[in-house]
């Protein structure tokens, strides 16, 4: 790793696949050092290798984002090595769908911990050095489901709605330190998470998307790149839906 002080350090959770991978590659192409977090080395290593091969700087970390202790330990190591993380992208997420009457405590808790508590854990550990430096970015990947609710996704919708509340609260707490905190709410994006859905569900989704196509991972990476840059200096506490016009 270089000690180039002009390089910003970005940390992306869930960087091994789908939206997080696209964000990691895009932030690297924008000139940032990228710390890629996923559950295992075997999942993050191909992304780290791709960044290194393209001449960028990257490091991978196997962390269960649902574990406060694991996030705390990882952040201690990262801060002692890099001093601060300038851009935090909380993207890791899972679904455990089921109708509310049949939803187990385990499926409820797994989704809340992985999709919501994780954002709190990483933010709490990494925001203090951003505040000292008087510059920082926190970008939380929520979902339109957090705005609209969805059949069979009470846990996921609650977690994503919680992410929006967290985003706005942290934005207020740190606005005076020039740290911006925003959320991106994707609609239906083509990734492993949505590949598993039934064709009938996909057809029904297409009918309510005015642009008549599903989103691509780069549709999300593009707005994250903008929110991570100084072009968005005066934007905080906002939710950006990227969904082909589904929620207006
Ligand atoms: P994905 O393809 O299923 O990838 C999920 C990523 O999260 C993987 O990198 C995975 O790591 C990581 N992850 C999951 N649980 C983790 C844990 N406990 N600890 C560490 N890493 C964990 O998902 P995606 O579709 O790209 O979604 C990314 C984000 O966008 C999620 O927050 C999702 O809710 C949100 N979103 C997606 C859509 C969509 O249509 N796809 C729509 C709205 C919002 P491993 O590879 O190690 O498992």
Image (tube, grey):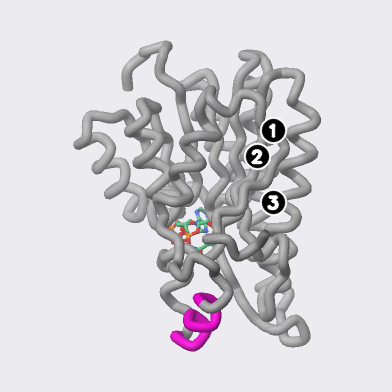
Front one among 32 and 236: 236
Q: Choose the circle earlier in sequence order: 3 or 2.
A: 3
Residue 174 vs 117, above or below: the answer is above
Q: Pointer 3: what residue? A: 117
x then y, percent, for residue 26? 37, 39
Q: Which mark is residue 236?
A: 1
User: Image point 27% across, 49% down: which residue?
Assistant: 46
Residue 69 visible in the snapshot: yes
> What separation in Å lies between label 3 and label 1 (alpha carbons)?
21 Å
Residue 89 is drawn in which quadrant?
top right
Please, what secondary structure does the residue beneath circle 1 have? loop
Per the image, is 130 magenta? Answer: no
User: Image point 58% across, 28% down: which residue?
Assistant: 232
x then y, percent, for residue 130? 62, 21
Tell me: is circle 2 under 8 Å from ligand 1.
Answer: no
Around disc 1, counting alpha carbons within 10 Å, would you say few (fewer than 14), some (14 to 19), or many (20 or more)? many
x then y, percent, for residue 142? 62, 54
Residue 49 vs 100, above or below: the answer is above
Q: Choose the circle earlier in sequence order: 2 or 1.
A: 2
Residue 162 is drawn in which quadrant?
bottom right
> What separation in Å lies between label 3 and label 2 (alpha carbons)?
16 Å
Front one among 227 and 19: 227
User: Image point 52% across, 18% down: which residue?
Assistant: 83
Tell me the quarter of the image containing the C terminus: bottom right
Q: Which residues are magenta?
A: 199-206
Residue 66 visible in the snapshot: no
Q: Pointer 2: what residue? A: 182
Tell me the quarter of the image containing the N terminus: top left
Q: Choose the circle earlier in sequence order: 3 or 1.
A: 3
Per the image, is 205 magenta? Answer: yes
Around disc 3, counting alpha carbons within 10 Å, would you say few (fewer than 14), some (14 to 19), or many (20 or more)? many
Please, what secondary structure does the residue beneath circle 2 have? strand
């Amino acid at each position: 790793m270089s000690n180039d002080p002009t390089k910003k350090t970005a940390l992306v959770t869930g960087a091994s696949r789908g939206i997080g991978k696209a964000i990691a590659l895009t932030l690297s192409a924008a000139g940032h050092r990228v710390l890629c977090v996923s559950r295992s080395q075997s999942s993050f290593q191909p992304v780290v290798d791709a960044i290194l091969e393209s001449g960028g700087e990257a490091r991978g970390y196997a962390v269960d984002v649902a574990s406060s202790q694991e996030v705390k330990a990882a952040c201690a190591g990262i801060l002692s090595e890099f001093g601060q993380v300038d851009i935090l992208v909380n993207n890791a997420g899972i679904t455990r769908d089921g109708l509310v009457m049949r939803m187990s405590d385990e499926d409820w808790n797994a989704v809340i911990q992985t999709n919501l508590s994780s954002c709190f854990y990483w933010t709490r550990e990494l925001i203090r050095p951003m505040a000292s430096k008087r510059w920082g970015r926190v970008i939380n990947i929520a979902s339109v489901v957090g705005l609209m609710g969805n059949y069979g996704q009470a846990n996921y919708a609650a977690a994503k709605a919680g992410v929006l509340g967290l985003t706005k609260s942290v934005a207020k707490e740190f606005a005076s330190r020039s740290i911006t905190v925003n959320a991106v709410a994707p609609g239906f994006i083509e990734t492993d998470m949505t590949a598993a859905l039934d064709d009938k569900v996909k057809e029904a989704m297409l009918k309510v998307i005015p642009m008549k196509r599903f989103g691509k991972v780069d549709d999300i990476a593009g707005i994250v790149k903008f929110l991570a840059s100084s072009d968005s200096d005066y934007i905080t506490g906002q939710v950006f839906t990227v969904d082909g016009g589904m929620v207006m």
